[in-house]
Amino acid sequence: MTDQTSAEVYPEHPATNYGLHTGVLGPAETLAQSVSAVAPTASATLTIPIVFALAGNATWFVYLLATCAILLVGFCVSRFARISASPGSLYTYTASSLPPVFAAVSAWALLLAYLATGASVAAGALYFANALAQQFLHWTVPSLAALAVVCAAAAYVAWRDVKLSAEVMLWIEAASVALILVVLAALVVHFGLRLDLAQLKDQLNLKAMNFSALGPSLVLAIFSFVGFESATSLGAEARNPLHTIPRAVLLCALLIGTFFILCSYSEVLGFRIMGGNADETASPLHLLAATAGVAPLGVATDIFAFVSMFACVLACTTAASRLLMKMAHERLMPRLLERTSKRHGTPAAAVVLAIVLMFAGTAVMTVRSVSALDMYDLAGSLSVFGFLTAYALMALALPFARRAAGQHSRILAAVSVVTVLVMILIAVFDLQSASDAVHGRLIPEIYLAYIVLGLLAYFLGRKTTAAKPA
């Protein structure tokens, strides 16, 4: 599990591409993978109002804190990505420097993170499909059928061509983000350029922040960013990966963080002027667009929110399938998942398994009458624990990897330690301040049980391998 070294650059080592098409993705397409996995439109339309319900005027400040935390992670990822490129994403980074058991934890945690995020945004797509169907047709979309269509379409594009997949995600996210920025600009034109002194003064006086809500609101804000590192799963398919991938990860964190801070501040300001709250409407951007006199753009934001959710399902499928393929290569998964299509250069079996698991998760909750918005929240909350674990282990491994590459730095080691501590603190805050038993106990217990099962599978696999004759 330590086959990744500072010398591993896939264009120079075609034998290590695992059957994927090498060098087919440029910088913009690599960046699109990370941006689509984040699904910025989803956060602007669904997550920010939920954060506002917890943090109030401190919403923009919570996103500022989340951006700082993610930039720490992004810095560590970018330094790792300069010395290693692999479809195994953060799992490979951990495996290169820490004992195998830590690598196994990272692999299983990251797999759950991608799958739960995919399930969450599939539910988000269902939410907006229903909103649009009710608005135009006065009709409720059949939940299981809609989820099946979204998942099947994502699986087809992910299997068909990674370049096509990246290009689809690129144009979807570029259009949706641009549309939201136009709506925010229309608000400025309508209301005039002004500062929201309530939001700013409350932060300076520490009055707006309800510290008991800091954990849950910060975790939700972190969920807005998760997946930003998923460009690392394209280590075999990106051109010049040791340069393209670290830049994509850092640029994604910086751009998306700025976008979220702007959206959260502007949405709260817009609703304050209107005399309402952002968490009191099913589609805040839709209402803000109507208020600003650009109602058609409000409808368009709902449409693009649905399409952006689909792009995120696609991005999570791409990342999860590459991780499954790498886990199969390391005997953490059946060898079948290691196979790739000779024609398309994609891991077909891994794509199918990833999308089936995403659909199964949402289908079970649908049968149990869980609403689409609750599915988005529950699956998203579960995914955050997986990402926090993978981020912390990656940061912990970084100083050892850099030392092995002859690039030891005390500053880098200090940043690594701070990053690990921040990830732990976020998890602790969330566990201590969760307001209900589901978020405070059930989801963490499910996550821990899953990790325990993953470790059992790892140890059984090692025992079976050791028992086989050479």
Image (spheres, rainbow, N blue to C red):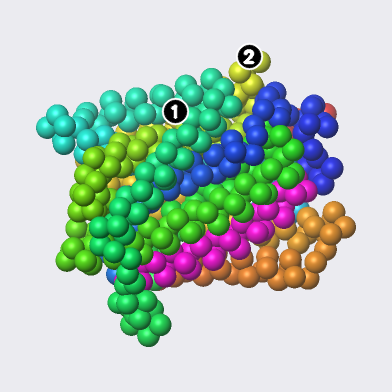
Q: Residues within 10 Å of mark 1 (few under 14, many from 20)?
A: many
Q: Amino acid at mark 1?
A: Ala
* Label 2 – label 1 distance at C-alpha: 19 Å
Q: Is residue 389 visible?
A: no
Q: Residue furthest right?
A: 406
Direction from residue 267 to residue 352 in the image, left or right: right
Characterize the magenta stretch by its predominant secondary structure: helix
* Image spot of residue 221 (x, y percent): 42, 60
Q: Which residues are magenta?
A: 57-84
Q: Residue at x 80, y 26 (%)?
A: 15
Whether the magenta-drawn stretch holds residue 224 is answered as no
Of 450 and 27, which appears nearest the observer? 27
Splitting the image into 4 quarters, where does residue 324 fall? Answer: top right
Residue at image location 37% in from the left, 58% down from the top: 263
- Left or right of 124, for residue 449: right
Residue at position x 42%, y 70% from top?
61
Quarter holding the N terminus? top right
Work out whether residue 109 or residue 58 is closer to the camera in this orientation and state it.
58
Indicate the position of residue 367 as horizontal and vertical percent values.
25, 35
Q: Quadrant of residue 14?
A: top right
The image's mark for residue 343 is 2
Q: Secondary structure at mark 2?
A: loop
Q: Amino acid at mark 2?
A: Arg
Question: According to the image, label 1 marks what residue?
Answer: 154
Is residue 76 at all visible to an observer of this figure?
A: yes
* SS state under label 1: helix
> Would you place residue 297 above or below residue 190 in this image?
above
* Mark 2 crowdedness (10 Å alpha carbons): few <14, some 14-19, many ≥20: few
The percent position of residue 439, horizontal first and vertical second, equals 35, 59
Percent of width and height locating residue 124: 33, 42
